[in-house]
Amino acid sequence: MNSQGLNIIKREGTVEPFSIEKIKNAVRKAFLSVGSFATEEDLTNILSRIRISDRMNVEEIQNQVENALMAEKYFSVAKAYMLYRQKHTEDRATRDRLKFMINYCSAENPASGSKYDANANVEKKNIATLTGELPKAEFIRLNRRLLTDRLKEMYGKEVADKYIDLLNSHLIYKNDETSLANYCASITMYPWLLGGTMSIGGNSKPPTNLKSFCGGFINLVFIVSSMLSGACATPEFLMYMNYFISHEYGVDYYKRVDEVVDLSLKHRTIDKVITDCFEQIVYSINQPTGARNFQAVFWNISYYDRNYFESLFGDFIFPDGSRPVWDSLSWLQKRFMKWFNQERTKTVLTFPVETMALLTKDGDIKDKEYGDFTAFMYSQGHSFFTYLSDSVDSLSSCCRLRNEIIDNGFSYTLGAGGISTGSKSVLTVNLNRCIQYAARYEIPYFTFLEDIVELMHKAQLAYNENLKDLKDKGMLPLFDAGYINLERQYLTIGINGLVEAAEFLGIKVTDCEEYATFVQSVLGLIEQCNKKYRSKETMFNCEMIPAENVGVKNAKWDKEDGLKVTRDCYNSYFYIVEDESINVIDKIRLHGRKYIKHLTGGSALHLNLMEHLTQKQYRLLLKVAATEGCNYLTFNIPNTICNDCGHIDKRYLKQCPSCGSNNLDYMTRIIGYMKRVSNFSAERKKEAARRYYSYGDEIGNA
Amino acid sequence: MLRFYNYDIVFIEIPDEISLAINITGCPNRCKGCHSPHLQENIGEILTKEILEELMCLYGSAITCVCFMGGDSEPEEVVRLARIVRQINKEIKTAWYSGRDKLPEDLPVGEFNYIKIGRYIESLGGLKSKTTNQRLYKVEKLLLSEVVI
């Protein structure tokens, strides 16, 4: 063994000259630990079996030592040597964890400190958030093992190995791998109306009045969220609340809202009673939650125009036989929106994420009253999502997810069936890397991608089998109790790096034929596969994921591997966020029917503006969106928060209008939900700074 | 003959409209503190009838107004272009952002739905400033009524 001038690579990546003495010492120690002694001859025999090449890593050399000891038949010594290595590995793992703990404690905020799943929905780091961070690596290992075992059983070892390969080479990414629970769900609360929370492990009876509705609803959202890794949507929230208010104050309550109905010294009116209920629910749900590592629950609600209401709840019957009433519900929806908008000038409130569902017809909103009201609320500075659809056969009840409504029908156990849906699991493909790998290996990218997408479907089916197993063992009471339905939950194929892939291929990312064709071919391929793997009990959809941290990770990994990476955080839109030449109408078009046709799971267009528009202008833009077939959008105008006096302003300002301070923070959507920019992870902060807010020029200065 | 630097879809310039704003170059006003000095140079493509048609066709019914930003070196050309806009689509409104302090006497104001006048004076601020000297007018039956942004 000639070892002169050779270097080896240590575990931490540093290079140092190879020393044969170190191997000899390790072997001697191993012999001594079993009460034996290594002679020079022993050492020569063992070393003669070892081949060192330049820049070999330590692990590889140690593997060779193990093999050499075995080959020389020193079995007990080999065992001692292995145990010694294992102990050191464990020590190193503990040391790494300690290091992580120290780094986390001194990170600027929890999202920047998080190693696995940066999330701005945790505002302050503390012992509770740290406790949540530490076992994340274990969860990832466990989830991978569960899935590969199942893949092996269903499709063989080769497929299981390939899944791990694709994950390790960052061609695909398993979202929320740090949690055991299924992803997100839009629930029907009908089982709660019938039986309370007993069936899902709670101890409350069904709500009987407004007060028990409010308290029980908060508990319900917490229970449900603790069994999901993502969002919980309650599309029936206001409809049920309307039912309980009507029971308490009469079906015409909304016409008598100024009436005093409280005998206490407060002399509350009906309106005050209702807004107090809003306050109780919204503030409670925005609290950090112990069971979710101090994250607030992700809570989503929906509003409907008359058409949606009639389609979704037309056949709905409350347990007492009565039906929901549109006029009072419509009043309550509007009241909630206005109240929430106002409340946000007092406190930073992230949840609920709201979606207004509007039916469109002939390039405009069919329900004129709701079209105008939606535009009015935007002009009042309220930020929420709008979902537009030509038919009420689909609904977006989440901050991102779009669902086909399979059966709108009412059922006595499930309530409004159409709203009970969600995504069981999201598995995301890094399109930029796929396209560049295909080019590197000179494989047509379509063929390369097809292969990966096929495997993703198999992995998702394996996940589904594991979920069914959990359900069979009674681990998923939300399904058993009818809040969600296994067959109505999607297995989601996520995409990331689409724009970057187009850029790599030299395709201009504007509304042009070439780009549209590229998008359609990629998304069409996924949709085709979704259909191929669809069965009676499994449905797939495709979504452009918000990628709060996947966008950052993919860009980082790709850069490290020498791929062409045009930005530090991959886009979550069909356009380039920092491209100033793409105007508002171009953006709507780039999220129009031509591009989103095959995106069955949806993606939201975020129109970032510097200043609020007038009601008429928002109304016109909704019309443009309806004409272009852009089905999901929101407007973001950063809100200003003064760090000195606490004033919150709906406008994007450089100076606090209340105290004149320049020490300001801004609230905007990190992805689907709104947070202070100071809570964003370091990379996301940079991305937010690069976002182009249309029309920022001071006017009249041409 | 006027040249233009670029175009954008804007909202704040003309309230209640979605405007296609065309940034015309060769601005003769030379206001102190001008924040688009590149528009003072005579650069960019010539703004022809064909280009105007092309842009209006591209944005179709998504826009409600075409706003000419500048063009003070040739007001009669801005008028000609505004007429073309209305010939192409009579539903579309026309606007002119001029940096002059007074409109040319013989200007057919009826060709525009909105006119903004007034040079930019740094100490008084732009159109949104309370102390501004600039004015935005809505033209109705050849009468100018002030619009406050």
Image (cartoon, rainbow, N blue to C red):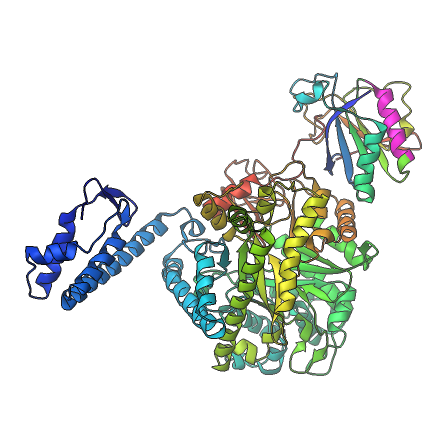
Main structural element of the magenta stretch: helix, strand or loop? helix
Q: Is residue A421 magenta?
A: no
Asked if residue B33 lies left or right of residue A67, the reply is: right
Give the camera-side residue of A538 and A151: A151
The answer to which quarter of the image holds residue A343 is bottom right
Q: Is residue B103 visible?
A: no
What residue is at 53 percent from the left and 68 percent from the top?
A458
Stretch in magenta: B74-87
In what quadrant of the picture does the C terminus of chain A appear? top right
Task: Name the spot of residue A489 as percent of width and height, x first.
Answer: 60, 70
Task: Name the spot of residue A144 as percent of width and height, x first.
Answer: 43, 66
Q: Is residue A390 visible?
A: yes
Give the camera-side residue of A292 and A465: A465
What residue is at 54 percent from the left and 70 percent from the top?
A461
The answer to which quarter of the image holds residue A608 is top right
Q: Is residue B86 magenta?
A: yes
